[in-house]
Amino acid sequence: MAVTEKRPVLVATEADDITADMVITELNRLDVPVVRFDPADIGADLTVSARFGTCLAPLAGQVRTPSKTAGLAHVRAVYWRRPIWPTFPSLSQDDAQFAAAQVRYGLGGALYAMERLLWVNHPLRVAAADYKPAQLATAQRLGLTVPPTLVTNDPDDAREFISAHDRMIYKTLRWTPYWRDGVPVTGWADPVTVDEIDESLRVAPHLFQAVVAKVADLRVLIVGRQVFTVRITSGLLDWRKDYSALSYSVVDLPRAVEKALQACLDHYGLRSGSFDLAEDQKGGLWWLELNPNGQWGWLEPHTGLHMSAAFAALLAGESP
């Protein structure tokens, strides 16, 4: 079994992740070793051993895959991309629940103990940044323009709010795997009217937001201190519904907006993030949301922006 001599980058992600592949290719060009794994492979294909309270170091141990081994004290950085936690379908429900928790707090805890490393991004930081109501308040404090938004499970408040605006959308507070009658349901930003509000709203909070009269959307990827801004035109309320209808152009952000987005990442302790903004008819930019681990891989071939190289440079410690 090969043990890497140079300090490796750990890449935690699912098996089929083209975006991670792009970053790994760039790390290979920099001659930086990579140990890639997925928590779902725990068992014969993934082993972790962590030691504490020894004279060697505060943390010692290894992460091992069938082909590579990385010493926990020797890791250069961690790219926490899109890992899948195991569910143990072969076990009983209670045993599977127990085993899954042990993996999260055993494997996860051992990795999280490497807190002084460069993480892109640390899972606990991502979790803290993943609350849309908190994002809205943070964005407004940083001087960004936020559309009128209501989070509520009160039907009367929802009706009053919707009635006060010309056009309103409903957005999920967090993407969650969801099926209805065996068919996967995706949470788009969809129009909503007063007539659609009933007492079932009381079951859980819902997010309602005034529609921005936009001419385009902006996807802003920040990697370390590098900023990549892509203007997306489509004519769609939610451009994710039809990627074939999109056109792209590379633009520059106003300096004040760029500083505010950097400050947002700093606030949450993130080294990277994908921001969605809406551009109105007067060129004004409206905050929509931050995705701490948003998709960007499809943009690179459309724009020629060196996004994957920026991630590799950051993980290798060569980013300015």
Image: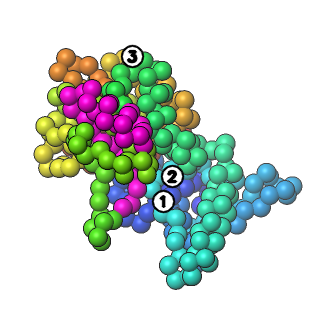
Q: Is residue 210 left or right of residue 274?
A: left
Q: Which residue is mark 2?
A: 80
- The residue stretch that appears in magenta: 150-178
- Residue 57 seen anywhere in this rendered image of the structure: yes
- What amino acid type should be assigned to the residue bearing mark 1? Pro
Judging from the image, the colouring scheme is: rainbow
Q: Earlier in the sequence, mark 1 or mark 3?
A: 1
Distance, label 2 to label 3, CA atoms, is 29 Å
Cβ–Cβ under 8 Å for marks 1 and 3: no
- Sort mark 1 into few (<14), some (14-19) or many (20+) by Cα contacts within 10 Å: some
Q: Nearer the viewer, residue 250 or 266?
A: 266
Q: Secondary structure at mark 2?
A: strand
Q: State the separation of the CA atoms marked 2 and 1.
A: 7 Å
Q: Residue at x 56, y 82 (%)?
A: 91
Name the residue located 58 percent from the left edge and 46 percent from the top edge.
124
Question: Residue 145, relative to residue 289: is it above or below?
Answer: above
- State whether residue 94 is above or below residue 260: below
Which amino acid type is shown beneath numbered disc 3?
Ala
Task: Bin the neighbour count of mark 3 within 10 Å (Cα to Cα): few under 14, some 14-19, many 20 and up.
Answer: few
Disc 1 designates what residue?
83
Q: Look at the picture and state if 125 lies above or below 88.
A: above
Residue 167 falls within the magenta-colored stretch: yes
Residue 254, given in percent of the width and then of the height, sits at 32, 18
From the viewer's perspective, is residue 191 above or below residue 89? above
Cβ–Cβ under 8 Å for marks 2 and 3: no
Q: Which residue is mark 3?
A: 256
| Helix, strand or loop under label 3 | helix
Report, in whole angstroms, how far the alpha carbon at label 1 lies from the one at label 3. 34 Å
